[in-house]
Amino acid sequence: MASRPEQLAPHHDRADTATLVEGARQGDRSCWDALVDQFSGLIWSVARGFGMSRADAAEVSQITWLRLAEHLSRIEQPDRLGAWLVTTARRECLRQRRLHGRMVLVEDLELERGRPAGTGADDDVLTNERDAALWRCLDALPERARTLLMMLLTDPPMSYTEIGAALDMPVGSIGPTRARILTMLRRDVEAAGITRRD
């Protein structure tokens, strides 16, 4: 029989997450609620880290939980549920961005009146091209590297302990792995000819 969430410590470790997933699979609503409590902030942070509006971030969150409900019985590594949710939320953010790309441009035009002196439409085009190129470089990284970077960029930031538990990584390896990923990303960005614009 699965442990009840109220019997678990407030900070669940990987074994606890696996127990909660198993309980949710068996239809234990309290286990599902505990998973939602544990990972809702993470999903929200991923969506907001992608620059989603509050409404779009809420939609990404709902769809991510729906995907988990649909695939709960097929999750092969329940102790790595955090990484699965981050990947799923990230994919949904990318889908939302493709669907709403034109809406973002319209919103940017609405901000035209508040534009600082000396900036214009050409600057917007160059900035948008740079941003698109940066996202292509990020998307070219291995999935695990992208997931780690997204977790490190959440707001508020996730602790190394939370990231280690979600990705099944030793906490001590997160910093060096982050440095290697950023070096790789910097190299790809430079190869793509992307320069910083002040």
Image: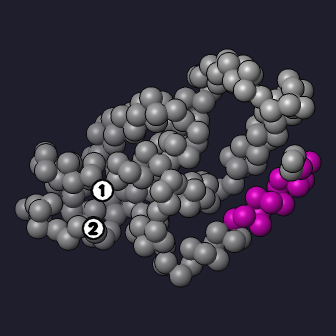
| Residue at 52% over, 54% down | 154
Boundaries of the magenta span:
181-195
110 or 2, which lies in front?
110
Find residue 131 and report its horizontal and vertical position in percent.
76, 40
Image marks 1 and 2: residues in contact by CB distance under 8 Å: yes
Tag shown at residue 12? 2
Q: Is residue 165 magenta?
A: no
Report the number of numbered marks. 2
Q: Can residue 26 be seen at all in this image of the molecule?
A: no
94 or 45, which lies in front?
45
Q: Does the magenta stretch include residue 182?
A: yes
Residue farthest to the bottom, as pictured:
172
Tag shown at residue 192? none
Mark 1 lies on residue: 38
Q: Residues within 10 Å of mark 2 (few under 14, many from 20)?
A: some
Name the kind of residue labelled 1 in the image. Answer: Gln
147 or 18, which lies in front?
147
| Residue at 81% over, 36% down | 127
Find residue 130 and report its horizontal and vertical position in percent.
82, 40
Find residue 188 and report its horizontal and vertical position in percent.
82, 55
Residue 178 image-quadrant placement: bottom right
**Distance from Cα at disc 1 to Cα at disc 2:** 8 Å
How was this image coloured? Answer: one colour
Q: Can residue 186 be seen at all in this image of the molecule?
A: yes
Q: Residues within 10 Å of mark 1 (few under 14, many from 20)?
A: some
